[in-house]
Image (cartoon, rainbow, N blue to C red):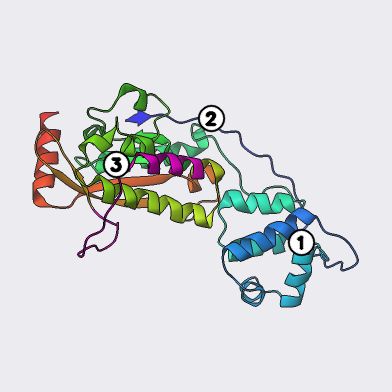
Amino acid sequence: MLLLGHTLRGIALRPWSDKTVDMTTAIAAPGFARELKHWRTLRRVSQLDLAIRADTTQRHLSFLEQGRSRPGRTMVVRLAESLELSLRERNDLLLAAGYAPAFPESDLDTSELGPVREALKTILDGHQPYPAIVVRPRGILLAANSAFEVLTEGAAPHLLKPPINVLRLALHPDGLARRVVNLPEWGKHVTEALRGRVSRSPDAALEELIAELEGYLPQAEPGPDHLGFAVPLRLRSDDGELRLITTLTSFATATDITLAELHLEAFLPADAQTAEILRARAARG
């Protein structure tokens, strides 16, 4: 199995009171008020709806957004959950309110996460003879099974130099893109999915990467039978054309940032011919 992880520092936690403080005469941290309103607007949630979700009052929420009240730590966590923020974004909101982060960011190589590494290896190996990968944010490859080689064949060496970015590998003219039969449609599917992700969680680095990837793609021209850009990957190979669909899996209940940000992408055959080709490749070793 290919393993290309990076070391991440853990975050020390400090105890804080969970008591909610409503001090209309005190000025709260302006960063929190600004961030709260930013996320509520981005999620297109009214003050009333958010107040109901977070089990508070619209008046109190209005005071928080104006900086007239300082939230307790528990209230910040409830608001972050109600806004469906990622664990990293929840930590940022806590910091903006003056509290320590609640969610650690662990090194995947630590002994504590050994069971996670073993589980990922089992999943990757069990998906053979079909390709499967584990990626970090912004497409950085962490691990892959041996069947992933079908997606790297013929790619330029500079795209396979660690840390491998699988998004760039997929759409770069010197990477997988040269073998993709339906590149305009499939590439648009990839970038549209990324655009959707960044619309919910703004990320300047990901925005920059998306712009780079879009620059590699030819113009997609949907015809009268166009059904959207969620299309199978049609890939040329020496054994014939492969048609692949993908599934994404994440640690939905993770309370560690490192685990929450990992995604398992599994490729599945979209037809019997593709399944047979991949089985034959695995048998040849």
Q: Could you tell me residue 189's position as x and y percent?
A: 33, 52
Q: Is residue 2 above or below residue 98?
A: above
Task: Say which residue appears at 13% left-offset and 45% top-offset.
Answer: 274
* Residue 250 appears in view: no
Q: Could you tell me residue 180's position as x and y percent?
A: 22, 41
Local packing at callout 3 (Cα closer than 10 Å; few below 14, some 14-19, many 20+) is: many
- Which quadrant does the N terminus fall into? top left
Quadrant housing residue 214: top left
Q: Which residues are magenta?
A: 207-231
Q: Secondary structure at mark 1?
A: loop
Name the residue beneath numbered marker 1. 72
Q: Is residue 49 left or right of residue 142?
A: right
Q: Main secondary structure of the magenta part?
A: loop
Q: Could you tell me residue 172's position as x and y percent?
A: 33, 35
The amino acid at mark 3 is Ala
Q: Is residue 269 above or below residue 167?
A: below
Q: Could you tell me residue 113's position as x and y percent?
A: 48, 38
Name the residue beneath numbered marker 3. 132
173 or 12: which is nearer to us? 173
Q: Which mark is first along the chain, 2 or 1? A: 2
